[in-house]
């Protein structure tokens, strides 16, 4: 292991060390406990800065990639991480959740995701997957006073472990059939026709199912509403975004490899099926939810369906639309959950949408943030959510998946309906009798940041898009 | 000879695996799992992985499963509850499992059988059994994964600590 | 960014579009309703002034709106999302100007009309109104399909809020219905736009959303049909055309007065504007092929809207359904693809905005007094409210299409033009004129005339000066347009003629068997750049 | 020599047995045990492949899997302890506060 | 020559008067209202006179004077707002401004005590302006503007007493029925513009004459182009001039103030249809089939309305039906090609019918608003001026020789005789009936004993000078107006016919009949019509002069059916209601309730419901049991794997 190798791990190391530092400070210098969140945010920013500075290329003997693609997806994960860290602070204090451990876990989960994005080899990918999964299981359970939180964690954990064994089976078969766990070897073997076709089909299907599970695509989705509903609200901003970003990246990478048709040409169709199922079922189920967190969970399923539209055409040009969509999703979900975390005080009880009645006026800024997030989720210009949808649909149409795009818009019409429900509850329903909430600054900052970014990027996406496209097209 | 050992331990693994799944009492299930793991360890040896077999017995059967036992006894969840309709496995679940598992097993085994059939193995080589190349592999090519595993274990420790801690404990803090 | 700011600061379309939106920012800090109202009125009047300032400096000589375009320092429209060739490209010509002027003029009118009717949250109301103005102007001026789509959607949310927050009993239902109907259409339009652009990118090898570029795309009939369907559906829902009109009565009935006025005055027109600007020129063969079907729908809309309006018991609903009938006429004119008909249709868009806008204002004034819109509650109001009666009769007559008032000119020209190209349809549509009299005079009968049946009505105060001020400009315009329409027809003639020529030229060709680019000359009939900021177009 | 397919078939059978267990048992810990069984069977698959290929990488994979399993077990069991404190049960059928 | 610069003032002045009074408002002092209200039509009349002098100062055949005021529209549709003064419009111009002013004057007295005095004059001025626009317009469009304008004023004035229930309803009915006619007019205009690209009268007529295809071949509905246009225009005329089947609004229109009935619903507006047909005579000459249709409709309307008039008791209703009937005469004339005679009758009718209406107004005024003739009687003594002027009008309409009505009606009958004997018989009978019911009216009103209440009797008084002066002037007119069109048996040539000749030139001189009747035949015809008229008068005298209503009661006992049928106006209103209005209303209701609410809204509702239902059913898949979720995953994998390898 050389110095070069370590430096190529700089962002991940920064995150890991920040996590350790936070933990240690908490343990040994209790006076500094207020520093946990600022440190976390700083660590995230530093990691982002370091990631930007990474020289493109391979390290760890070709096992760790640094390229425009990985950079962009890493940054999306870091955006989600940072926003979650900010959004959580107030909530954690309020709910008496250990802050340092929580933030450290978030950071380490981010490490797992970043590495999974950059990993070039299935074994590493699996280990990273497990790394962040375990963090997520634990984080879901952090609200230990609340039975819901624990139940959410148990469900997530059991499903996760169950699915892990399938993923592992897939990796095992890939290893067996191609004598390697490296992705590039896999691609070569597929081209060369090495290995049993049906076994490899099964193996890759299992991998796709595994990452589909992390992305909560139908039919691998069912855990997400329960988990989102029970888990601490600000954490869901992370849970519902970051693992999906990393998983979508790996999924797209796998699908790119499968694009060579060595294992049949049904893969795009397969993803198309998952996309359609997710969009339709996700939206339909979100439509009938009265609990905002569950609604957002189902809507998340639908959103991954939109992402899957782009995944169904895994060409070179698919990277940017997926990344843009996920970034938009990260921002708007962060905004939504940050607001939800502030507005709903009774953990372990349903967060009924109807309770928001009149909040749009009582908490104008927060209400506006939530409304903007909702409109963005609904894909209404001039929000970044629309830009994401636009990119994904354009990619699909460009690559001959018009029918998927049409299903997508029809489904998102259903989506608009339930997002509007939140908006009209905020602004159009008469105010109910509720006690005044004391809103903490951190949460509001997070919501405001997310909503502002959603709007600004929606109005002026040009520079970002250009940068993303250049980055994706550039190195690698 | 090898065939006999294989057959015996394969049978043992299967029977104990069924017991793991079928036994009402989790303690018995856990103990059966130990048997399965041990039997598998023997097969590992047959397959030229004595180091892994050792680890299997030491770490897996010895440590992890004991942890299970420990927790089961701690929680005193000796038996699955059988009363009340809530706890019964629904017919959909049951039949879904049976059909799904049947198809999956049938397909998987058929494919495996068709792919490898009676394909014979090359004789065991020194390199496969040796530990040194394994170590080289671990600390050189797969160093990254190893480092991640390190973090993973750290995470597991911290996570388990927090999750299992009594909530009352931190209320003071 | 700097060039954008420079553009926004100058006497440009960009400033016109963005000023209302930017002016809504101080509203965040205004708490008192009275201050807000005055502020909004000032802003809206400034916008009017800016509009006329722009028209005065770039409007063009001899009473014809010239084509102007906002250009950056490099002499090209500003890049917005360069990756996809999306530009912040604002162009105004004779087709968009009349509607834009109407939109700008209606804002102070609406403010005056809502002075009392809106009782809460004025800053939010004002912000919605200003954003709506920006959206409308943007959609009218956008020359880039992506930009157009953005502005098209931007209009949606403020209107949704206006209906939903300040509306009547079933406001949420109506607001959501409005949103979903419009969204349903526009999402399909989005797909169509993307498809169109992807095809262009394939054929031309470069990305562009620019209207003038996409016009050069010659598509096979099959593709045209689908794309046309996507565009047309979005526009027809907005118009709204039978049978996708049912959101309109609900939206109108529930919307506050100002919302109704804006909705009827401007938003609906964007449907017909879009149809004229985009659906027809971009897909000439397809729109020609769909003409019989759409003519049928337009005719049904005219007659059906009138019949249904006739049996309404709610004053506002009656006016709402009358919009269906009136816009049926506009669609008839557009579908006729005849210059006279197009002139009439464009004028009729304005006319409908004026007369129906006035009617909604009047209904609102009545509602402010009596908190009901049901006919059974009225009757004999001419006695206590003669001025109100005057305006109501006046606006009704304009709406009925009485000569010497504006409505007649539009209808007459539409019918003349439509008769030339469609014959029977125009004659049948003429019958709509009869029906218009039936339902609108029923409205007069039930509100103004007859003995006063309800005691409450006996003491109703007549219109205040503020209310008269809000109605008077509309009434004056109605009269002036009716008496001397030439001055209002001339500015748009050139632009319409150019569009029509291009449309007909395209129709003469057989559609391509495979998507291809037309030579530049084919679209030369249409006004196009390059233009220097603030200077008139040289063709 | 035992053909490699026998090992693989055995592993497949163990995997399916584990799956059935995970899908039909109610006790959370039993489900977890079944999942461990599945992991173990995958280990067998990998070792068998490793033997077939004469490649040590498979052994390395199994090594990692064991570590992962250990970590999972630690967190998972902690979760069971925590939830049992709250609900006095680890029957997954009863852990259904959140649904629909 | 000033006329071509002044023409525009003629309609503009009344408009200005209306606007000014409108702005001054109801609170303005009476003198200023009067000054504007009467000054405007007077000024208009003066300008008209100047223009007419200019026009007549030209040597015959006097070329038309045209003034283009401004371009109304531009572009491919270029229509000017332009005025035309030719022989035809000169006649109309004179009638409208002169009678119009008189009625303004009369109204100043009649309406003096009404609420909304100023409003009334705003409407009336507006009407004058519109009517003059109609008359002076030099193209179909300007004519149509005026056409609709007068319709509006008619609506407003009928509904003048808006606080009552009937008048506004009657106004609405008038407007809507008129609109149905306008539908035809507009369709005609569309067809004309489509073919010739212009709407200017003289150009259109020149082109249609030159256009060989206009009168042959099939254009639409199995008609030639000329016939189609003629039919469309005639539909418009039917509405405006109250011909079968669109006459129903006119009797109801009597709900308005009486001067209005005189001006609009007798003298001017209702004759617009006749004017239009005469104006478009070129087209009608090219469409003999439609001309016959016009004649038939005219004749039928004449006799039909006359019979209804027999049984009406409301003094204004009788006059209303009489108007419908007389308009029928005019169309009869136009239909048989005697356009100038139609205009002639239009002119004379304007005088005597205005006179009659104003006279009846004077009566009603005296009776404090009572309109039922059964409550009147013997008013001769109380209202001498009214009686004598009314008397003149009566004789004029009844066709007593020497008075205006005689000459014009006789000319029409003569023209009809040479064209179509059946129509002539109908016309003749109608003349008799007319004489009868008008006499009935006079005898019931002015002769016999007073049948009203004592209070009414107490109030009886002659009207003020503003009312009686117009009566006298109109009475004079009713006598002398006919002398400008003496029949060929008395004068060498019908001067009026001759005068209009430049505008109404027979396209095919050979067919034009009336002039070729021998003097003997004409004398016989005159005798016949005079005889019929006198018979009617004397029959009525016997029945009503002294016995009042007794004879009528006896008749109704003997033939209740006939009486009811006539009194019920043949139940045409009821038929329309039953077969047109109600079905349409039903259709509208169905459109709203079934199509809109049920089908469209319903399908949307069902759509959303099904969407929500699906969602609601599907949500139960998320059971909360993690084993189920695992099973979904597992089954998903299995199913997808099978799909992949198949």
Image: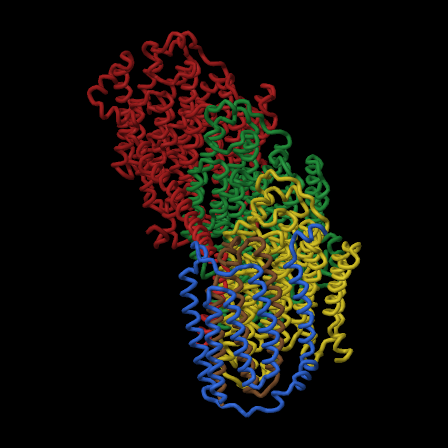
Chain colours: A yellow, B blue, C green, D brown, E red
Residue A141 image position (x, y, % from top left): 62, 58
Whether residue A402 is situated above or below residue E547 in the rendered picture = below
Along the horizontal axis of the image, is C416 left or right of A117?
left
Residue E145 image position (x, y, % from top left): 50, 39
Quadrant location of residue E68? Answer: top right
Whether residue E393 is situated above or below residue A34 in the rendered picture = above
Residue E264 image position (x, y, % from top left): 45, 29
Judging depth in this view, the residue of A37 and A410 nearest the camera is A37
Which quadrant is home to the C terminus of chain E? Answer: bottom left
Whether residue A256 is situated above or below residue E51 in the rendered picture = below
Judge whether residue C319 can be spotted in this image. yes
Judge whether residue C185 can be spotted in this image. no
At 51% from the left edge and 21% from the top edge, which residue is drawn?
E105
At 46% from the left edge and 83% from the top edge, which residue is drawn?
B7
Quadrant location of residue B110? Answer: bottom left
Quadrant location of residue D44? Answer: bottom right
């Amino acid at each position: 292991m050389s110095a070069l190798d370590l430096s190529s791990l700089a962002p991940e190391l920064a995150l890991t060390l920040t996590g350790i530092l936070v933990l240690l400070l908490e343990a040994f210098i209790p006076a500094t406990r207020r520093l946990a969140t600022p440190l976390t945010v700083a660590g995230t920013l530093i990691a982002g800065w370091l990631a930007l500075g990474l020289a493109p290329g391979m390290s760890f003997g070709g096992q760790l990639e640094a390229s425009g693609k990985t950079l962009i997806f890493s940054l999306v994960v870091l955006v989600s991480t940072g926003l979650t860290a900010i959004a959580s602070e107030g909530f954690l204090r309020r709910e008496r959740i250990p802050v340092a451990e929580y933030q450290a876990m978030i950071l380490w989960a981010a490490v797992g995701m970043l590495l999974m994005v950059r990993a070039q080899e299935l074994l590493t990918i699996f280990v990273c997957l497990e790394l962040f999964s375990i963090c997520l299981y634990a984080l879901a359970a952090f609200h230990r006073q609340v039975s819901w939180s624990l139940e959410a964690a148990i469900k997530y954990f059991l499903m996760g472990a169950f699915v892990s064994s399938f993923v592992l089976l897939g990796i095992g078969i890939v290893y067996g059939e191609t004598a390697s766990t490296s992705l590039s070897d896999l691609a070569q073997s597929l081209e060369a026709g090495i290995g049993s076709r049906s076994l490899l089909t099964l193996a890759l299907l299992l991998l796709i199912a595994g990452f589909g599970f992390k992305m909560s695509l139908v039919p691998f989705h069912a855990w997400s509403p329960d988990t989102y509903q029970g888990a601490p609200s600000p954490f869901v901003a992370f849970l519902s975004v970051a693992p999906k970003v990393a998983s979508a990246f790996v999924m797209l990478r796998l699908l790119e490899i499968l694009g060579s048709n060595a294992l049949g040409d049904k893969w795009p169709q397969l993803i198309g099926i998952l996309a359609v199922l997710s969009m339709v079922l996700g939206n339909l189920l979100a439509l009938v939810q009265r609990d905002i967190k569950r609604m957002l969970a189902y809507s998340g399923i639908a959103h991954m369906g939109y992402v899957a539209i782009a995944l169904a055409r895994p060409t070179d040009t698919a990277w940017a639309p997926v990344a843009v969509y996920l970034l938009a999703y990260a921002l708007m979900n962060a905004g939504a959950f940050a607001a939800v975390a502030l507005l709903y005080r009774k953990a372990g009880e349903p967060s009924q949408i109807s309770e928001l009645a009149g909040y749009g006026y009582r908490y104008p800024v927060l209400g506006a943030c939530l409304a903007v997030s909702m409109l963005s989720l609904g894909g209404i210009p001039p929000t970044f959510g629309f830009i994401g949808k636009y990119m994904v649909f354009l990619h699909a149409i460009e690559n001959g998946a018009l029918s998927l795009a049409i299903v997508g818009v029809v489904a998102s019409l259903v989506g608009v309906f339930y997002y509007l429900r939140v908006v009209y509850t905020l602004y159009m329903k008469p105010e109910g009798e509720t006690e005044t909430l004391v809103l903490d600054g951190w949460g509001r900052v997070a919501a405001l940041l997310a909503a502002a970014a959603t709007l600004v990027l929606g109005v002026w996406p040009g520079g970002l898009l250009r940068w993303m496209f250049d980055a994706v097209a550039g190195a690698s | 000879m090898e065939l006999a050992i294989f057959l015996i331990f394969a049978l043992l693994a299967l029977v104990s695996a069924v017991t793991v799944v079928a036994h009402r009492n989790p303690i018995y299930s856990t103990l059966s799992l130990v048997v399965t793991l041990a039997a598998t360890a023997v097969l590992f040896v047959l397959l030229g992985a004595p180091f892994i077999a050792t680890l299997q017995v030491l770490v897996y059967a010895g440590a992890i499963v004991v942890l299970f036992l420990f927790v089961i006894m701690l929680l005193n969840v000796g038996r699955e509850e059988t009363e009340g309709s809530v706890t019964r496995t629904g017919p959909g679940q049951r039949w879904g499992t049976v059909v799904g598992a049947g198809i999956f097993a049938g397909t998987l085994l058929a494919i495996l059988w068709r792919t490898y059939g009676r394909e014979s193995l090359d004789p065991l080589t020194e390199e496969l059994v040796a530990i040194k190349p394994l170590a080289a592999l671990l600390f050189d090519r797969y160093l990254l994964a190893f480092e991640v595993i390190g973090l993973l274990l750290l995470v597991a420790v911290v996570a388990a600590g927090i999750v299992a801690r009594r909530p009352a404990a931190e209320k003071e803090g | 960014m700097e060039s954008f700011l420079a553009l926004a600061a100058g006497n440009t379309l960009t400033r016109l579009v963005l000023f209302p939106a930017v002016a809504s920012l101080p509203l965040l800090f205004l708490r008192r309703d009275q201050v807000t109202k005055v502020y909004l009125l000032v802003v809206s009047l400034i916008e009017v002034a800016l509009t006329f300032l722009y028209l005065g400096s770039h409007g063009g000589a001899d009473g014809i709106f010239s084509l102007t375009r906002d250009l950056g320092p490099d002499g090209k429209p500003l890049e917005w999302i360069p990756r996809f060739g999306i530009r912040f490209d604002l162009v105004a010509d004779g087709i968009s100007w009349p509607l834009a002027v109407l939109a700008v003029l209606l804002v102070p009118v609406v403010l005056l009309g809502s002075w009392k009717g809106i009782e809460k949250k004025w800053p939010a109301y004002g912000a919605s109104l200003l954003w709506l103005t920006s959206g409308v102007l943007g959609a009218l001026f956008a020359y880039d399909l992506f930009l157009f789509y953005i502005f098209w959607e931007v209009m949606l949310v403020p209107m949704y809020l206006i209906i939903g927050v300040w509306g009547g009993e079933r406001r949420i239902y109506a607001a959501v219905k409005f949103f979903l109907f419009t969204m349903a259409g526009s999402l399909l339009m989005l797909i169509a736009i993307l498809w169109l652009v992807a095809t262009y990118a394939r054929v031309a090898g470069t990305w562009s959303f620019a209207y003038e570029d996409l016009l050069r795309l010659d598509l096979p009939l099959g593709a045209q049909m689908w794309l046309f369907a996507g565009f047309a559906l979005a526009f027809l829902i907005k118009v709204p055309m039978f049978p996708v009109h049912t959101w309109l009565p609900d939206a109108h009935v529930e919307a506050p007065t100002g919302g109704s006025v804006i909705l009827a005055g401007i938003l609906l027109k964007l449907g017909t504007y879009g149809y004229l600007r985009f659906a027809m020129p971009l897909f000439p063969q397809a729109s020609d092929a769909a003409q019989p079907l759409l003519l049928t729908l337009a005719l049904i809309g005219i007659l059906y809207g009138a019949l249904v309006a006739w049996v309404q018991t709610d004053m506002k609903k009656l006016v709402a359904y009358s919009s269906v009938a009136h816009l049926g006429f506009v669609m008839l004119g557009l579908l006729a693809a005849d210059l006279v008909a197009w002139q009439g249709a464009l004028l009729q868009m304005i006319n409908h905005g004026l007369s129906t806008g006035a009617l909604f204002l009047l209904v609102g004034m009545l509602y402010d007094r009596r908190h009901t819109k049901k006919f059974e509650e009225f009757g004999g109001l001419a006695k206590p409210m003669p001025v109100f009666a005057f305006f109501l009769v006046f606006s009704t007559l304009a709406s009925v299409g009485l000569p010497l008032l504006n409505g007649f000119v539009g209808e007459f020209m539409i019918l003349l033009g439509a008769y030339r190209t469609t014959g029977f349809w125009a004659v049948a549509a003429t019958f709509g004129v009869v029906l218009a009299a039936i339902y609108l005079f029923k409205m007069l009968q039930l509100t103004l005339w007859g003995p006063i049946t309800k005691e409450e009505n006996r003491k109703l105060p007549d219109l205040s000066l503020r209310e008269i001020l809000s109605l008077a400009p509309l009434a004056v315009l109605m009269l002036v347009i009716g008496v001397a329409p030439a001055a209002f027809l001339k500015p748009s003639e050139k632009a319409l003629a150019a569009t029509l020529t291009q449309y007909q030229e395209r129709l003469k060709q057989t559609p391509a068997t495979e998507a291809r680019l037309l030579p530049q000359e084919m679209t030369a009939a249409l006004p196009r750049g390059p233009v220097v900021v603030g200077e008139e177009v040289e063709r | 020599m035992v053909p490699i397919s026998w090992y693989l078939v055995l592993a497949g059978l163990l995997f399916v047995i584990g799956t059935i267990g995970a899908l039909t048992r109610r006790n959370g810990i039993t489900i977890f045990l079944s999942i461990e069984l599945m992991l173990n069977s995958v280990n067998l698959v990998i070792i068998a492949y490793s033997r077939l290929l004469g490649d040590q990488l498979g052994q390395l994979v199994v090594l990692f899997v064991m570590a992962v399993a250990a970590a999972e077990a630690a967190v998972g069991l902690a979760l069971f302890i925590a939830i049992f404190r709250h609900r006095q049960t680890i029957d997954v059928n009863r852990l259904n506060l959140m649904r629909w | 020559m000033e006329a071509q610069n002044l023409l525009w003032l003629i309609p503009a002045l009344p408009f200005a008067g209306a606007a000014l009074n409108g702005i001054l408002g109801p609170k303005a002092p009476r003198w200023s209202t009067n000054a504007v209200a009467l000054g405007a039509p007077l000024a208009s009349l003066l300008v008209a006179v100047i223009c007419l002098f200019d026009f007549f100062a030209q040597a015959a055949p006097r070329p038309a004077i045209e003034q283009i005021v401004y371009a109304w529209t531009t572009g491919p549709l270029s229509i000017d707002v332009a005025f035309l003064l030719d022989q035809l419009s000169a006649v109309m111009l004179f009638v409208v401004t002169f009678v119009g002013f008189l009625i303004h004057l009369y109204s100043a007295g009649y309406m003096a005590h009404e609420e909304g005095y100023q409003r009334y004059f705003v409407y009336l001025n507006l009407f004058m302006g519109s009517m003059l626009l109609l008359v002076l317009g030099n193209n179909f469009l300007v004519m149509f503007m005026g056409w609709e304008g007068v319709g509006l004023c008619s609506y407003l004035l009928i509904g003048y007493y808006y606080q009552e229930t009937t008048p506004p309803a009657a106004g609405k009915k008038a407007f809507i029925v008129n609109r149905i006619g306008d539908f035809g007019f507009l369709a005609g205009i569309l067809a004309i513009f489509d073919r010739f690209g212009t709407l200017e009268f003289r150009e259109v007529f020149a082109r249609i004459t030159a256009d060989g295809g206009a009168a042959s071949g099939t254009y639409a509905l199995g008609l030639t182009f000329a016939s189609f246009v003629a039919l469309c225009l005639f539909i418009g005329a039917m509405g405006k001039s109250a011909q079968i089947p669109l006459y129903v609004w006119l009797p109801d229109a009597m709900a308005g103030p009486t001067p209005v009935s005189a001006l609009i619903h007798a003298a001017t507006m209702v004759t617009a249809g006749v004017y239009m047909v005469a104006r478009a005579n070129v087209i009608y000459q090219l469409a003999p089939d439609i001309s016959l249709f016009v004649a038939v409709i005219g004749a039928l309307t004449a006799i039909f309305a006359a019979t209804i008039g027999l049984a009406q008791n409301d003094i204004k209703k009788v006059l209303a039906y009489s108007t419908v009937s007389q308009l029928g005469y005019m169309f009869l004339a136009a239909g048989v090609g005697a356009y100038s005679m139609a205009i002639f009758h239009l002119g004379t009718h304007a005088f005597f019918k205005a006179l009659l209406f104003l006279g009846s107004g004077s009566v009603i005024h005296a009776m404090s608003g009572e309109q039922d003739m059964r409550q009147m009687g013997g008013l001769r003594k109380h209202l001498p001026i009214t009686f004598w002027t009314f008397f003149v009008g009566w004789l004029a309409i009844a066709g007593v020789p020497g008075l205006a009505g005689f000459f014009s009606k006789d000319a029409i009958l003569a023209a009809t005789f040479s064209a179509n004997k059946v129509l002539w018989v109908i016309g003749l009978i109608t003349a008799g009936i007319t004489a009868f019911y008008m006499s009935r009216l006079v005898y019931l009103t002015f002769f016999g004993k007073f049948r009203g209440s004592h209070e009414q009797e107490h109030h009886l008084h002659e009207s003020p000078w503003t009312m009686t002066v117009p009566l006298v002037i109109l009475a004079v007119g009713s006598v002398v107006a006919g002398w400008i069109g003496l029949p060929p048996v008395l004068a060498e040539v019908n001067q009026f016919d001759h005068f209009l000749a430049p505008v109404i030139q027979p396209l095919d001189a050979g067919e034009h009949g009336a002039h070729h009747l021998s003097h003997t035949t004409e004398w016989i015809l005159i005798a016949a019509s005079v005889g019929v008229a006198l018979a009617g008068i004397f029959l009525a005298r016997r029945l009503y002069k002294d016995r009042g209503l007794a004879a009528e009661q006896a008749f109704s006992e003997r033939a209740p059916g006939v009486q009811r049928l006539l009194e019920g106006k043949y139940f045409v209103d009821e038929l329309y209601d039953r077969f047109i209005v109600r079905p349409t209303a039903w259709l509208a209701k169905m459109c709203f309730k079934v199509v809109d609410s049920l089908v469209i809204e319903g399908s949307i509702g069902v759509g959303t419901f099904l969407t929500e239902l699906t969602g609601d059913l599907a949500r139960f898949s998320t059971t909360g049991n993690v084993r189920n979720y695992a099973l979904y995953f597992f089954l998903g994998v299995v199913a997808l794997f099978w799909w992949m390898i198949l």
